[in-house]
Image: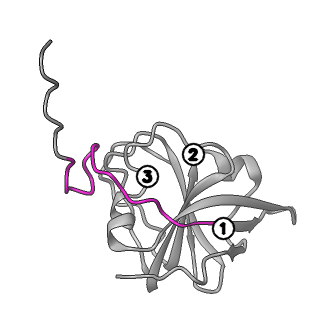
Amino acid sequence: PAAPAPARPKSKDVSAEDYVMPTLPRAHVRLKDAYGGVHRVEVEVAATGESRTRGLMWRKSLPAGQGMLFIFPDEEVRGFWMRNTLIPLDMLFITSEGRVVGIIENAEPRTLTNRTVGIPSQYVLEVPGGWCQKNGIVRGGTAEFEGVSTIPVTP
C-alpha cells in the first residue's frame, strides 16, 4: 500500500481557510427589542487582535440566536468587512454603555466594503443576516453582556 501523504502544515495566516483558531470564550448578549422584549444571543467572544481579524470567516452557517461579539479595548469608530465570510450578517455597533448606535443589515458576503455606522463603539455583535429585522432589534436599543467582564481584551 502507498504511504499516506505527509500532513500539510496548518496556515499561520489568520484569514486562511485552513488556519486553526483557538477555541474562543463564550458569553451571552441580551438585546432589548423595539417592543420591550428581550432576546438572548449566545456568542463566541473575539477579544484579541487575532480573533477579531478572523471573526466568522469561512463559517458556512450561523444558527439564529448565536453570534460573535467583538470586544475592543476602547471606544472608536469601527469599520468591518466581509473578507472570506461566506454568509450574510447583521452587525450591531454598541457603545461601552450598552447602547446600539447603529446596525448594518445583511452585509454581503465575500466583500471588502468597509461597513461603518460612523459613531464610536466598543463592541460589535454579528448575528445571522436578517435576524435584527425579524426580532425587532433597532438602533437606540440596549444590550447587556453576561460573562464578558472576566475576559481579557487585548489590542
Around disc 3, counting alpha carbons within 10 Å, would you say few (fewer than 14), some (14 to 19), or many (20 or more)?
A: many
Camera sees residue 105: no
Residue at the image position 33 percent from the left and 54 percent from the top: 113
User: Could you tell which of marks 2 and 1 lies nearer the N-terminus?
Assistant: 2
Asked whether 13 falls inside the magenta stretch, the response is yes
Q: Quadrant of residue 155?
A: bottom left
Residue annotated with mark 2? 129
Query: Which disc number belongs to residue 93?
Result: none
Q: Is residue 54 above or below residue 64?
A: below
Around disc 1, counting alpha carbons within 10 Å, would you say few (fewer than 14), some (14 to 19), or many (20 or more)?
A: some
Which is more toward the observer, 35 or 96? 96
Amino acid, disc 3: Leu
Residue 122 rendering spot, x and y as whole percentages: 50, 80
The CA distance from mark 1 to mark 3 is 23 Å
| Chief SS of the magenta region | loop
Q: Nearer the viewer, mark 2 or mark 1?
A: 2
Query: Which disc number belongs to residue 139?
Result: 1
Query: Which disc number belongs to residue 56?
Result: 3
